[in-house]
Amino acid sequence: MKVLINHLNLSIMITRRKDIATFEETRQFIEKNFTRDIPVALICREFGLNRTKLQEGFNQLFGISVHAFISQERMKKARALLTETDESVKVIAIECGYKSISSFTRSFTRLHKMSPMQYRSLSFPNRKPSDKLTGSDN
């Protein structure tokens, strides 16, 4: 393995095909399971990697951290559900793997600079909000 010294941090470059294949499998696993709670420790166990190797290797190969990739996949699904369905924000939050509507709304708003309902209203400018769209499905 080649070693790259960068600002006094040692970073192991991924040069083995086996490592690349493992990280590709890891990415595919996340893409299939991002709606579940998948802590890094679970991914490490599943693929026989230690935390550092997983985090650094994934970042080197895909240019994004494991956590950020999971969030990215969740937001991609959320955007699709907001624009393609009439599901409530609460249901969408759960379908995207969030444990609460508040954590979903906070994450969505931080990324998109608008709430999920504002995002949806931009996609459907002539639609009037209904109970289903606002998340009042009680």
Image (spheres, rainbow, N blue to C red):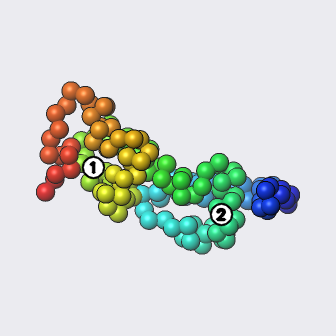
The mark that comes first in sequence, 1 or 2, is: 2
Name the image quarter holding the N terminus.
bottom right
**Three-letter amino acid code of the residue under disc 1:** Val
Q: Name the residue at 54% across, 52% down.
A: 69
Please, which residue is most extreme toward the right here? 2
Element marked by disc 2: helix
Q: Quadrant of residue 118?
A: top left
The answer to whether the residues at label 1 and label 2 have Cβ atoms under 8 Å apart is no
Residue 16 left/right relative to 86: right
Q: Amino acid at mark 2?
A: Leu
Horizontal side of 128 relative to 121 (left or right) equals: left
The residue that disc 2 covers is 54
Camera-side residue of 24 and 70 = 70
Residue 67 falls in which quadrant of the image?
Answer: bottom right
Image location (x, y in percent) of residue 15:
81, 55
Residue 63, relative to residue 128: is it above or below? Answer: below
Separation of marks 1 and 2 at Cα, in angstroms: 33 Å
117 relative to 2, above or below: above
- Residue 67 visible to the viewer: yes
Name the residue that disc number 1 marks. 89
Residue 71 image position (x, y, % from top left): 48, 53
For numbered disc 1, what is the local secondary structure? helix
